[in-house]
Structure formats: C-alpha cells, structure tokens
Image (cartoon, helix red, strand yellow):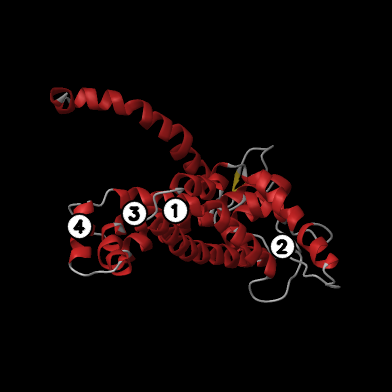
Amino acid sequence: MDKMLRNKKSIAFFMLPAFLLFTLVLFIPILQSVYYSFCDYKGITAPVFIGLKNYKTLLSDKTLGIALKNSMFFLIFSCVSQLIVGLIYAALLTNIEKGRNLFKNIIYLPCVLSSAALGLLWMFIFSPSLGINQFLESMGVKEPPLWLMDTKGFIILPMWIIAFVSLWQYVGQSMMLYMAQISGISKSLMEASYIDGCTKAMTFRYITLPLIRPMVATAMSLNAIGSLKFFDLIFNMTEGGPNHRTEVLATHLYQQGFKYFKYGYASAIGVVLLVLCLIVTLFINKVVKTEQYEM
C-alpha cells in the first residue's frame, strides 16, 4: 500500500475519475455561467456578447435588492440558530443513555424528507383558511394572522415562518455533525474535569466547545452556503410572493432564467451568488479560529 501511495502514476489513475466528474459537472458549468453572464442569451438563439450590461441591470433591479436582503437574513438566522439549537441537541443527546437513538432519528428525520413535500405540507398548515387558522377560528379568533401573506415590517412575517421551518428541517444535520465530533473526545478528559470539580456546564464550555470548534466552522460553512442557495421551501410555500417580498437569490435566478428566459441575466445572478458563497466561506474560516488538539 505504501509503495502504491508513493507511485505518482497510481495516484493520478485513482484521482482521474473524480477529477473528470468534477470538471464536467461543476467546473465547466461554472465557466459557462460566467461567460453567459456577459451575454444576451435566451436559450434558443446563440448568446450575444454585451459586456457588463447584465451586471449594470443588477444595480437597478429592485427585486434583486429584496432577494439579497432576504438571503442575508437567511444566512444570519441559519448560522446562529443552527449553531445554538444544534449544539443544545447534541449536548443533551450525548448525555442521555435511554432513548438517544429514538430522539436522534426523530430530529434528523426531516433532513431526509423531500423539501418539496414539506413545503406543500407547511403551506397548507399556514394557509389562511386551513391548518392553524382553522384551529384559531374554532377557538374564537376572528382575524387570525396571514402567516404567508403579511407584508408588514423590514423582515416580513412569511420570511420568519419559512426560516423557522428551515430550522426545523435542517437542524438535525448540524446536530449529527456535532455529536460525531463530541463522541471522538476522550472520556478521560471528561472524567478528569469532573474529578477537578467541574459541572457538566463548565465541562461543556471549557473542554467540549474548544475541541469541537473545527466542526463548528465546517457546520457553519455548510449552513451559510445552504442558506444562500435556499430555494425549495420558499418556492413551494410562497413562490417568492406576495409581490416578490419573499424572493431570495435562488428563486429570483429561477424566475429570470426559466420563467422569463433571460439566461444571461440569470447567469449574472448566479455569479453573484457564487461570489457571495466564496466570501462567506472565507469569512467564517477566518473568524472561527480552529486549532488541532489530541483527543
């Protein structure tokens, strides 16, 4: 095995399939999108190079401003809420013996379910005449909230509803990552802290948190990228409405590309989304300092 690892031809041979797949599925489409972002392209005729016109249009696109604001809201909400709730779940489930697998599976289950199906489910739950509102009316509430149609406030009510549904669906992923890292911590460290008089809260703060910090950075990066690309729940629950107030970058890209056939302009939005993902990932890796410890 060591001889094979020292053989550069063997390494190149085993890496070739993954490299080809990465190039064909990811790298080439990215380059094509960057090129199309400088073109007037409607998908039927050949793309016509127009320079920076699509990017100039972005600056005056009011819907893009709303979409960018909502994407930033999802980014902050997702990173903070998934970090806090995921850590709480991981800490609680790590310290219980009976029922751990049951609760872990219940929390993680929404992650593997279809987002399209869940979006339709929650749309009916928050419908003006069904679900929660039907229950509230039976309890005597004459004017229940318009959960997915209210447009008041800087961050409107539908965005908060979708954000909490997203937290419910994806927090299991963060929980599983943290639990995997916590399970790798040596039990002797925990026992030594208890012998020294530390409580479970102190042990979690001064031992567990520093040791799982690399996984925190990884989970936050995944949450940040996922929140910036967020599409399915919003599209199924509100389709970006009412009046484009729940648009995010991914839904605006979809509308421009597949509804209005402005593939060049949609590609420009895609490039902006790609740059944002790279900037946020670099920022998280810079801010969340990680050190390697022996566990």
Name the residue type under label 1.
Ser
Left or right: 176, with 196 as reference point: right
Name the residue type under label 4.
Leu
**Against 59, is 93 above or below?**
above
- Disc 2 vs disc 3: which is toward the camera? 3
Q: Mark 4–mark 2 contact, CB under 8 Å?
A: no
**Against 263, is 206 above or below?**
below
- Distance between the alpha carbons at the discs numbered 2 and 1: 30 Å
Q: Which residue is mark 4?
A: 189
In front here: 267 or 191?
A: 191
Among the two numbered marks 2 and 1 on one chain, the one whose residue lies closer to the N terminus: 1
Left or right: 50, with 28 as reference point: right
In front here: 254 or 59?
A: 254
Q: Which mark is residue 174?
A: 1
- Disc 2 vs disc 1: which is toward the camera? 1
Q: Mark 4–mark 3 contact, CB under 8 Å?
A: no
Q: Mark 3 falls on what kind of element?
A: helix
**Against 127, is 101 above or below?**
above
Among the two numbered marks 1 and 3 on one chain, the one whose residue lies closer to the N terminus: 1
Name the residue type under label 2.
His
Q: Which residue is mark 2?
A: 244
Q: Is residue 274 visible?
A: no
In front here: 221 or 265?
A: 221
Among the two numbered marks 2 and 3 on one chain, the one whose residue lies closer to the N terminus: 3
Among the two numbered marks 1 and 4 on one chain, the one whose residue lies closer to the N terminus: 1
- Measuring from the top left, give residue 22's x and y in whole percent: 41, 35
